[in-house]
């Protein structure tokens, strides 16, 4: 698209379930690293879908708010919240929540660099 196009507000929804191999404490909960990885992957997929394949994470902030049960399906919702100058930076937020109660178990805020835009600027 042209520089006038915007993808702010674009969203991605995904389902995730953690098994025994992703547990801590002998099955107490899903491991924080597994939870963070699922959020990171969701934000990266949204960036690829809306900005192109040349995006990579430069900053990520995660908040683990409550226990994530094993063998239970959770909903991840991610959204593009802002684009930087010329689309070189992409800001995305995501939540992992219980689809039944709506309770947010974990969330993240990421900043990605769109190398296709950075490289295009240098030419």
Image (spheres, rainbow, N blue to C red):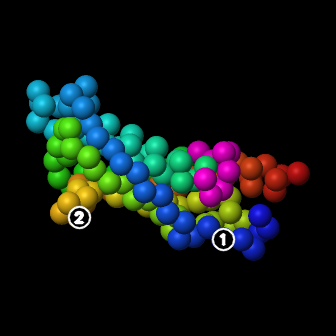
Q: Is residue 109 visible?
A: no
Element type where label 2 sits in the image: loop
Vertical relation: 77 (above or below) 32: below
In the picture, measured across the screen, residue 91 lies left or right of residue 63, that is right
Rounded to the nearest angstrom, the CA distance separating label 2 from label 1 is: 29 Å
Examine the structure image and report whether residue 111 is included in the region drawn in magenta: no
Q: Quadrant of residue 13?
A: bottom left
Q: Which residue is mark 1?
A: 6
Packing grade of label 2 (10 A; few <14, some 14-19, many >=20) is: few
Q: Which x, y percent locates residue 104?
A: 25, 60
Element type where label 1 sits in the image: loop
In the picture, measured across the screen, residue 27 lies left or right of residue 122, that is left
Examine the structure image and report whether residue 54 is included in the region drawn in magenta: yes
User: Closest to the observer: 106 or 118?
Assistant: 106
Q: Residue at x 11, y 27 (%)?
A: 26
In the picture, measured across the screen, residue 23 lies left or right of residue 49, that is left
- The magenta-colored residue range is 49-56
Q: Which x, y percent locates residue 123?
A: 88, 51
Query: For the view shown, which residue lies furthest in the bottom direction?
Result: 4
User: Closest to the observer: 35 or 15?
Assistant: 15
Q: Which residue is mark 2?
A: 102
Q: Is residue 7 visible?
A: yes
Q: Residue at x 11, y 36 (%)?
A: 28
Q: Which x, y percent locates residue 14?
A: 40, 51
Packing grade of label 1 (10 A; few <14, some 14-19, many >=20) is: some
Question: Which quadrant: the N terminus?
Answer: bottom right
């Amino acid at each position: 698209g042209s520089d006038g196009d915007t993808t702010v507000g674009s969203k991605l929804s995904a389902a995730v379930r953690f098994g025994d191999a992703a547990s801590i404490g002998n099955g107490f909960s899903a491991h924080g690293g597994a939870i963070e990885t699922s959020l990171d992957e969701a934000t990266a997929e949204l960036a690829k879908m809306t900005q192109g394949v040349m995006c990579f994470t430069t900053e990520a902030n995660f908040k683990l708010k409550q226990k994530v049960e094993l063998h239970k399906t959770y909903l991840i919702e991610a959204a593009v919240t802002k684009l930087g100058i010329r689309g070189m930076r992409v800001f995305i937020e995501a939540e992992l929540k219980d689809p039944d109660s709506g309770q947010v178990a974990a969330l993240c805020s990421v900043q990605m660099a769109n190398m296709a835009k950075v490289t295009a600027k240098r030419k």
